[in-house]
Amino acid sequence: MKLQTISLSTATATAFIVLSFLMAASALPVPQLTLAPRAHDGSFQSTNWSGYAVTGSSSSVSIARGSWTVPAIQGSCPSTNQYSSFWVGIDGFNSGTVEQTGTDSDCQNGAPTYYAWFEFYPHPSFLINGMTITPGDSITAQASFSGRSFTVTITDTTTGVSFSTSAKVHSAQRSSAEWIAEAPSSSGGILPLADFGTVSFSSCTATVNGATGTIGSFGSSVQQITMVSSSGAVKAQPSSLSGSGDGFSVTWKSAGP
């Protein structure tokens, strides 16, 4: 997600529902929301991201994959809409594109709202309306690059439904892999972060320069990112990596923005 306005146009993406065979599903634009590169606020802070990134040289990252459990909105939704996005992707830490797919746990019109989406920023984001997302669902996602195209795949392993689509992204650097909880943006800037409690990521791996490993295996290339408000107050705090180096959690602290 990025801090700039994008025009959303009606489109259809090719989707694949994995049951015992492949079926078609459609995707619709996500109204008003933008998922974008990290908005910097200090070396390891961001006003819209919290989680982990593995950085590399240009054209070094080919795969990012990971899993998480869809967190439930905590307490009652306020009258003001709030949003929280959870995703796996390539690029955006120090570059201007992001290739990503994930889920949202939002407060919209006073009610908890859950859905899946994908985005090849700066192209618009799209809802995956063939997937019904419920708190507690186990999600596995991957972003990959092969040939000249990126492919994002997201699977609700609780329901067995999966979606995959590909696109070319001009100027993509392939210089980072990410596992992120995000406060998405609109034309007015970063939106209030919905209280998702804690989200847990697991089985997080990346392929960089042809070598595949857990987040922790990449040593000094690992970046831990804390989400802060413009005044410096913490909005979402990542934990340390698990002992196996492939998992962590992010805990909501404040709505911001």
Image (cartoon, grey):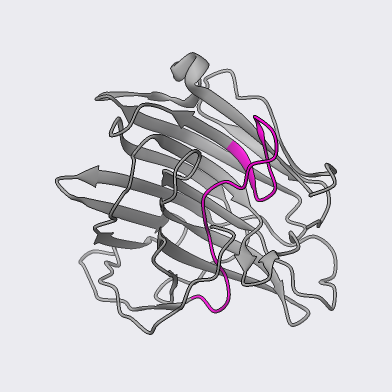
Give the vertical position of 162 relative to 179 (above or below).
below
Could you say which quadrant of the image residue 256 lies in?
bottom right
The one of 170 and 107 positioned closer to us in this rendering: 170
Q: Main secondary structure of the magenta part?
A: loop
State the residue at coordinates (76%, 63%).
192
The one of 26 and 80 positioned closer to us in this rendering: 80
Is residue 45 on the magenta stretch? yes
Give the vertical position of 210 relative to 51 (above or below).
above
Is residue 66 on the magenta stretch? no
State the residue at coordinates (33%, 63%).
163
Give the vertical position of 122 relative to 232 (above or below).
below
The one of 22 and 15 positioned closer to us in this rendering: 15
- Name the spot of residue 56 as percent of width and height, x first: 39, 26
- Name the spot of residue 67 as percent of width and height, x first: 48, 44
State the residue at coordinates (80%, 60%).
74
Where are the magenta residues, as a range?
30-51
Q: Residue furthest left?
A: 147
State the residue at coordinates (45%, 29%).
55
- Name the spot of residue 230 as percent of width and height, x first: 79, 49
**In which quadrant of the rendered image does the C terminus lie?**
bottom right
Q: Tag count in the figure?
A: 0
Could you say which quadrant of the image residue 3 lies in?
bottom right
- Name the spot of residue 234 as percent of width and height, x first: 81, 42
Relative to 120, 112 lies left or right:
right
Could you say which quadrant of the image residue 14 lies in?
bottom left
The one of 7 and 101 positioned closer to us in this rendering: 7
